[in-house]
Structure formats: C-alpha cells, structure tokens
Image (cartoon, rainbow, N blue to C red):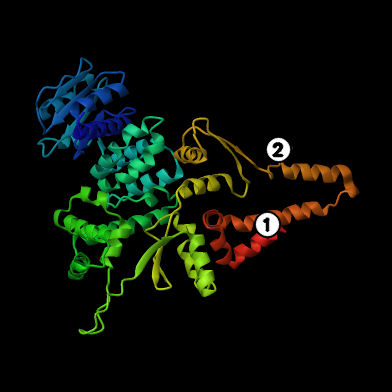
Amino acid sequence: MSESLTFTEFTASIVAETFARKAKGKTLGVLGENLPRFDIPAFIKELQGRFDSPYRLALLGGSSEPIRSGKSVEITYDVMQANQWRNDKAAKAKKLFIVVHGVVPKIKSLRDVLVPVSDRQIRSVLCERAVSWLDSEERQALWNFLQKNSDAFSVNLLLDFAAYSEELGCKEKGKIDLAESEEKNLWRLGMFPHLGLLTHSGVKKLARTAKLNLDLVGRMRSLSKQDLRTITSVLESEEALRTERETAKGILGYSRSKKRELLRDLSYAEVAAVLSYKKKKKKSDDEDTDPDVIRKERELGDESAIKDLIRNDGKNIGMIAKAFSCENDFDEIANEEIKVDGKIVIRKIRPGSSEILHAVNRLMSEDNYGGIIRCDSAVDYIDCLKIMESGEATRISEFRPQDTSDRFAIRSIIENVVNLYGESIEKDVLVAWDNYLEARRSLLDSLGELTDHPLLALVGNADTLNACEVLVK
C-alpha cells in the first residue's frame, strides 16, 4: 500500500465517522463541502460499517468514474438526482450523504435541508481518535492544542501527522513507540521534532513551547539580512563545529525550498545556536589572535552544582537551579542558556529521566506515598518505566497511608493504637505524624528537581533544604 493511499484511506475513515455522527437522529442527511482529499471507496466502506440500513451517496463536482458499492448504497454524480432524492418517498428510510468538490450549481437547496459537516467537527473527531490510541494527559494536552489552533495547523496537516501514527496506535505492542513516532513526525506539522511537545500536560507550557518552535521555523522561512550574514559567518569560520556548518546549510536549504521534510533533520537548539553565532574580531591587524569562541557544554544539574561550588563558592547556584528547573519538563526549548566561567551551559538530559519523573509524578502526591509497579513483559526496570509511561498494561499498587477507609493504613493503625492503649502510649505520636505530613507536603512541588538533580535542588533552594531537614529529623 502506497504512502499517499494510506493517508487518503485514513482521512476517509475520519470523514466517514464525522458524517455518521452528524447523521444520527431524524436528520435527512449530511452535506460535506471543502473536505480534505480522501479515498472514495474507503469512505463508502467506512460508512457501510456504521449503518445497518441502506443509504444514498451523491458525489458532486469530482470524478464520475463508476465505483463499486454494493446493493445497500445508491450513488449518483448528478446534482439534479440528489435534489430529487431529498423529496422522494425513500428519503426518510435512506440517509442522504453528499460530498461536494469545487463549485456545484443548484446546491443551495441541499444546504437548506441537510446537516453540514464543518472543519471544526472533523478536527474534533480526529483529536478523539488520536487520543484513543494512547490516552494520557500529555497526549490529550497535545491533541487539544492542535485541534484548537486551526490557524497554525490546518486539518490536512493534522491528518497527515496522525496517519503516520495510526498503525502503531492500533497495535498494543506499538503503543510503546507511539510517542517516539509522533516526535519524529512533528515536521509534518511544520515544526522541529521535539520530545518536549509530547511530555507536557499543562496547556500554558505546551503553548509556549509550540510558539517558540513555530516562531523559529517562521524566522527560517524568511531570513533577515542579519541572519544571512550570521549563517555566512558560520560557513566561513574555521572555528565553527561541523554540526554547526551542517545546520547552517540546512537552514539555507529550508529557507529556499520551504519543504517541511527538511525540518526533520534540524533541531530547535541547533538552529537557535547558529542564528545567534558570534565570533570576536581580532584586536588589531598585526595581532594574530584566534576569535573568542564561547564553548557550549551540556551538563547534568548536579554536575554544574558541584563545579560551581568548587570554583565559585556557589555564587551561580541560584541561576543554575533556575535553568535546570523541572517546570520546563525536559523542554530544552524553554531552557535559556546560562554563561558560567566563560562557557555556556545547556541542560543535559539523563537517559531515562523522563520515564522516572513520570513514575514519580504518578506515584507521589498528597495522597500517594509511592507504590509498586508490576510489568511481566519488561526486561528491566527502565523497560518497565517506559511501558508504564506509554500506558501499556501494568499493575500499580499505590501506598496510601492516609486513607482512612483502609484499616491497615498507617494513620488508622496509629489512631487505633493510641485509642487502645490510652495513656501508656505517647499521644504526641499523632502530632509527630502530622508534622511529618506537613514537611512532606511542602516538598511535593520540588519532587522533579529532587529526583533529577537532588544536590542542586538542595543547595539552590533554601526552602527545599529546610523542608528536607525537618523531614529527616
């Protein structure tokens, strides 16, 4: 099956489902105009699968080549015939579906009696279908964002993006690779591939990340004179890295052709670095000095903290802690580069960090105090965490010591012991437990930092350090 046919068949399925939903009840039929391109035989088959009774289909303004449809479907290519169908005796028994391509005369009378299908409704069905493949907060946030931003993402772009993930989404074993597939195919939406767009569950963070991504792509489409001078400087510089020169060539290639597929091999961080590339001029014509090229290094949070504590007595800790904050959810786009000791430090993501943070956020909350994850198909704990993040079948036993409905919960046990033994037990034990809960509660907002870079989290935030000291006393 060809690539284009896969897209048109998938689109046919989405359009057919939209038609079927609009046809419920006592409606005479449904009218679709200015629809995305789709496979007509697949559309007919999809509609047949959603209706037990026969129906009529008018294909107006397009090809009139005969199509095999079976006895349950009547097909016409004539607008006059479609108008007769809406008034004849069989109109109530057979739903009328009309697909209009281009300008068709005498269509107004059909618009007056048939329920229209809108672009917004198709987007809604598509969003619902995509989320159903792997229903998680992150994917709900992404697809809701894509659905609502019709100016940036046309329905054709969304269909193209979703069509290449459907095969994985419809297979249980494929769901674990769904996020990776969608990340790689973000270029189909006119954006740089970026995992951060698939790991946000907050609308504001996702919108900010997407805006930065789209703005930079827009900047590449129409490079300024300064951008062109900067790119030329990178290409001509002996100090520029090979990857920087390749990125510079990629920027020029995209700017000339505007082909979306060229975004596949670029990244936001690399493009932003090239477009902000600077080299220091020589002090004089006689002085043979090398340009002052600022080194860029990716470092883990605790690695940067240790270096700054040793070299600078921690004077840059606050700035480093802010740059490594997990509020950005591993979003390299939102993280600003920071200059420390004459070099630029960029946040480095430890392999598996996303999966571990997902598990921590799932199992650690005001009510949950951890838990046990069971996954029979996992080969190791990293694989188990990946499967959990993908929404695959895992068994999770949550530890809830504050659950008063559970007589074996810690709080219930403490209260029962105090009530049973009376004065022989220190009643302050309940006070101590409540103090522990308060200290723990104050740390919940810092879970991400404490999980990813505990040292930096402690030395970079006095409140977090004090809360931890209270907790362990």
Q: Which residue is at 17% across, 53% downward?
A: 258
Point 35% across, 35% down: residue: 129
Give the Cα separation between the discs numbered 2 and 1. 21 Å
Q: Is residue 451 above or below residue 124?
A: below
Q: State the image coordinates of residue 398 (x, y, percent, origin top left).
A: 61, 40
Looking at the image, do the residues carrying marks 2 and 1 touch, with CB atoms under 8 Å apart?
A: no
Secondary element at tag 1: helix
Residue 252 appears at what percent x and percent y? 18, 59
Q: Quadrant of the N terminus?
A: top left
Camera-side residue: 19 or 14?
A: 14
Q: In the picture, which quadrant includes the C terminus?
A: bottom right
Camera sees residue 131: no
Is 44 left, or right, of 169 in this rendering? left
Q: Which residue is mark 1?
A: 438
Relative image position of residue 338 (x, y in whole percent): 41, 68
Q: Is residue 241 left or right of residue 33?
A: right
| Residue that mark 2 sits on | 406
Label 1: few (<14), some (14–19) or many (≥20) C-alpha neighbours in 10 Å: some
Residue type at numbered disc 2: Asp
Residue placed furthest toward the top = 71
Mark 2 secondary-structure assignment: loop
> What's the amino acid at mark 1?
Glu
Q: Quadrant of residue 87?
A: top left
Q: Nearer the viewer, residue 448 or 128?
A: 448
